Amino acid sequence: QLQASGGGLVQAGGSLRLSCAASGRAGGSNTVGWFRQAPGKEREFVAAISGSGSTYYADSGRGRFTISRDNAKNTTYLQMNLLKPEDTAVYYCATRRAPGWSGTTTGYDYWGQGTQVTVSS
């Protein structure tokens, strides 16, 4: 299972740190991805981190977001700085069984329940 947390309401320019705790088959050294879905829009890729620590970012968050993981705690983090109103969405974490990484929702096998991030202007 995956448990995402850390969302909330923040003003533009502020920061939030999301956490994704993995357990069972969703845990281990699998690649972890963060996605987000705004109302009326498709779920989109935000960032991913492989088991070895390689990181990948969508253009929307590059330079503002940092993904990291603590393998001992089976937890992945998404530090989000300089937040913008357009970052408002439900953020989901996901893991994939296959090696490598993916920027598409179909590339991931396990999904958390999502955490709401709201950025006010």
Image: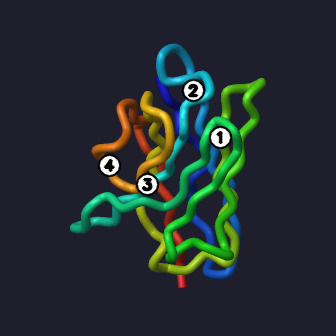
Residue drawn at (47%, 35%) of the image: 95
Residue at the spot of label 3: 35
- Callout 1: helix, strand or loop? strand
- The residue singled out by tag 4 in the image is 105
**Badges 1 and 4: C-beta atoms under 8 Å apart?**
no
At label 2, the amino acid type is Ala
At label 2, counting other C-alpha atoms closer than 10 Å, the crowd grade (few under 14, some 14-19, many 20 or more) is: many
Colour mode of the rendering: rainbow
Labels 2, 4: front one: 4
Distance, label 3 to label 2, CA atoms, is 16 Å
Q: Distance between the residues labelled 1 and 4?
A: 18 Å
Q: Earlier in the sequence, mark 3 or mark 2?
A: 2
Q: Are marks 1 and 2 in contact (CB under 8 Å)?
A: yes
Q: Which amino acid does label 3 sit on?
A: Phe
Viewer-closest of 115 and 73: 73
Disc on the earlier residue, 1 or 2: 2
Alpha carbon separation for disc pair 2 and 4: 18 Å
Q: Which element type, helix, strand or loop, lies under badge 2? A: strand
Report the residue marked by disc 2: 22
